[in-house]
């Protein structure tokens, strides 16, 4: 697998690695694609909402370490509003790219950062906890990457239909051609991404 020099540099000498003492917030996420995990520790100024310090611990692959490392560099000194604008594509570009099958590592790092910020905002009363809805499902599907194109399945318009019934049944129609070798991987990833929501009682995926 071909990694850029920047990925190798951040993997071998990660920035901001370890545990922060007395962080404002801690968040851990696992990647549904591979089971790897990452934890972020954030020190946030309660008045200015600037991320004054950030560190991470990785339980994953080389790209997991490299993307978490670059994300800490990208958001340190930013306000939480600015940090929320940093995307997995920004992190990937900053590393001079990642192999397509490793793009989900970058998604994991950004998802974990956003989870940490969301937890902080809820804890500080800056936002209400999100009620479960179809929008939450669609937002989650934005983290499912179609490896060949390096884009998420919502942007690629592969998700044709999403419905959430009152009894917790979710219907998703996916448009992925029969001969596509990524078909089962994408379906498995959709299932794994949605597994964490206890509100979903049944998941019915239909393939075009
Ligand atoms: Fe899953 Fe890197 S985080 S392979």
Image (cartoon, rainbow, N blue to C red):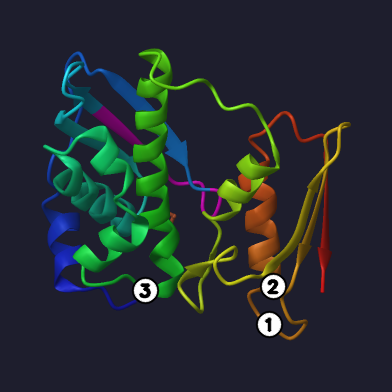
Q: Residue furthest bottom?
A: 179
Mark 1–mark 3 CB contact (< 8 Å): no
Secondary element at image label 2: helix
The image's mark for residue 183 is 2
Q: Residue 201: percent from the left, percent from the top?
A: 82, 34
Instruction: Determine the image quadrant of residue 178.
Output: bottom right
Q: Please report the residue visible at 80 percent of the width from the left and 48 percent of the height from the top.
A: 163
The residue singled out by tag 3 in the image is 99
Position of 165 compared to 194: left or right? right
Closer to the chain start, of discs 1 and 3, is 3
Q: Residue 88: percent from the left, percent from the top?
A: 35, 57
Q: CA distance from mark 1 to mark 2?
A: 6 Å
The image's mark for residue 180 is 1
Position of 65 compared to 189: left or right? left
Q: Please report the residue visible at 22 percent of the width from the left and 18 percent of the height from the top.
A: 23
Position of 165 compared to 78: left or right? right
Secondary element at image label 1: loop
Quarter containing ligand 1?
A: bottom left
**Span of residues in magenta:** 32-41
Q: Residue 101: percent from the left, percent from the top?
A: 45, 70
Residue situated in front as seen by the camera: 36 or 162: 162
Q: Residue 16: percent from the left, percent from the top?
A: 13, 39
Does the segment drawn in magenta span residue 87?
A: no
């Amino acid at each position: 697998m071909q990694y850029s020099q920047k990925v190798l540099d951040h993997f071998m000498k990660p920035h901001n690695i370890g545990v922060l003492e007395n962080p404002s917030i801690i968040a851990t996420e696992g990647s549904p694609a591979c089971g790897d995990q990452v934890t972020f520790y954030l020190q946030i100024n309660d008045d200015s909402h600037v991320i004054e310090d950030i560190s991470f611990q990785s339980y994953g692959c080389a790209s997991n370490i490299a993307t978490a490392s670059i994300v800490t560099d990208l958001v340190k000194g930013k306000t939480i509003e600015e940090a929320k604008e940093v995307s997995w594509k920004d992190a990937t570009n900053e590393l001079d790219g990642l192999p397509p099958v490793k793009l989900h590592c970058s998604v994991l790092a950004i998802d974990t950062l956003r989870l940490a910020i969301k937890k902080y905002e809820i804890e500080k009363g800056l936002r209400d906890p999100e009620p479960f809805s179809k929008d939450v499902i669609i937002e989650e599907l934005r983290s499912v990457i179609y490896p060949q194109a390096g884009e998420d399945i919502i942007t690629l318009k592969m998700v044709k239909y999403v419905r959430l019934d009152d009894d917790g049944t979710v219907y998703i129609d996916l448009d992925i051609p029969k001969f596509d070798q990524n078909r089962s991987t994408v379906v498995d990833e959709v299932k794994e991404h949605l597994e964490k929501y206890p509100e979903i009682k049944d998941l019915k995926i239909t393939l075009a």
